[in-house]
Amino acid sequence: MKFSTREDIEVPIEKVFAAVSDFEAFERQALRRGAEVHRDDTFGKAGVGSEWVIKFKFRGKPRKIHARISEFDAPNGYVAETDSGGIDGLVTVDLVALSPRRTRLHFSIALTPRTLSARLLVQSLKFAKSNLNKRFSARVWQFAQDVEAKHRATA
């Protein structure tokens, strides 16, 4: 199962990459939403090998995700691999400079079940895919708007 969307942002590619790779900000957002986030590496900065363990509740059950950056190509994007209870995930963030002041962000998440219970969970998500895709696209759109607003405020 795959979710993907793209947004054009009126910000230079370097600034967009800085925003999409600001993992400390993402950690704070997850903490505000009730998740437990633990950095599982000793690098201290983003790059290949950076790892996190995230614990949260989904559909009334405790879940745990192990995430690891497998590719990191500044300022063009990165790939993160996730593992959560029998579901493998691949998060891809691609950036393309359309002009010196405009960047296209392509964001995708691919989920692959490995167990029967994971297949059932992914199958139930497929029934709500159009609604989930709208919410996913709306979140990415809001992120793009926030990046543009921050850039205008500092420019």
Image (cartoon, grey):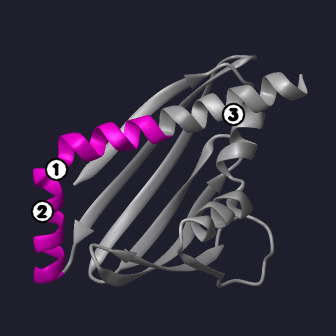
Nearest the eye: 131 or 20? 131
Q: Is residue 21 above or below residue 45?
A: above
Residue type at the position of mark 3: Val
Instruction: Note whether residue 95 is visible.
Output: no
Q: Earlier in the sequence, mark 2 or mark 3?
A: 2
Q: Main secondary structure of the magenta part?
A: helix
Instruction: Please identify the residue farthest to the right as the structure is shown.
Output: 155
Q: Is residue 50 above or below residue 154?
A: below
Q: Position of residue 131 (x, y in %)?
A: 23, 42
Could you give the CA–CA distance between mark 3 and mark 1, rounded to whole angstroms? 29 Å
Q: Which residue is mark 1?
A: 128
Q: Quadrant of the N terminus?
A: bottom left
Which quadrant would residue 123 be assigned to in this image?
Answer: bottom left
Q: SS for tag 2?
A: helix
Residue 147 circle label: 3
The residue located at (78%, 77%) in the rendering is 43
The residue located at (64%, 59%) in the rendering is 26
Q: Which residues are magenta?
A: 115-139
Q: Which residue is mark 2?
A: 124
Q: Quadrant of the C terminus?
A: top right
Q: Position of residue 75 (x, y in %)?
A: 71, 41
Q: Earlier in the sequence, mark 3 or mark 1?
A: 1
Could you give the CA–CA distance between mark 2 and mark 1, rounded to whole angstroms? 7 Å
Instruction: Note whether residue 135 is visible.
Output: yes
Q: Position of residue 58 (x, y in %)?
A: 33, 73
Q: Is residue 148 above or below residue 63?
A: above
Within-10-Å neighbours for mark 2: few <14, some 14–19, many 20+ = few
Q: Are marks 2 and 1 in contact (CB under 8 Å)?
A: yes
Residue type at the position of mark 2: Ser
127 magenta-colored: yes
